[in-house]
Amino acid sequence: MSSRPRVGDLRVGDVVRLKKAHPCGGFLWLVNRVGGDIGLRCETCGHYVMMPRFRIERRIREILGGGADGRIT
């Protein structure tokens, strides 16, 4: 059984896949800010959003990696 991705595992520079598509059709988001809120930029259209951690926790499908520390998952 695989575990759910955790917001605590996010790093600036990671790319994440969310459960629902953005209105532009993109599923992939780049993490720009990690803190009380998470800053995400759509990889398809460049739209920037800030969301509280608890909302992101439910919406993340997978963390594709590539963060600032160079790890790839």
Image (spheres, rainbow, N blue to C red):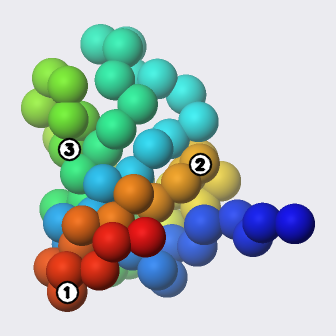
Q: Residue at x 70, y 65 (%)?
A: 4
Kindly identify the amino acid type of the residue bearing the numbered disc 2.
Arg
Q: Quadrant of residue 24?
A: top left
Q: State the residue lying farthest toward the top.
A: 24
**Which label is found at residue 41?**
3
Q: Image height check: is 18 above or below 72?
A: above
Kindly identify the amino acid type of the residue bearing the numbered disc 3.
Arg
Q: Residue at x 20, y 35 (%)?
A: 43
Q: Which residue is mark 2?
A: 61
Q: Residues within 10 Å of mark 2 (few under 14, many from 20)?
A: some
Report how far apart the C-alphas of labels 3 and 2 lie in the structure. Answer: 16 Å
Report how far apart the C-alphas of labels 1 and 3 lie in the structure. Answer: 19 Å
Closer to viewer: mark 1 or mark 3:
1
Point out residue 60 in the picture as x, y percentages from the top left corner. 55, 52
Q: Quadrant of residue 45?
A: top left
Point out residue 35 in the picture as x, y percentages from the top left corner. 32, 79
Q: Which residue is mark 1?
A: 69
Check the picture and name the quadrant holding the N terminus. Answer: bottom right
Mark 1 or 3, nearer chain start: 3
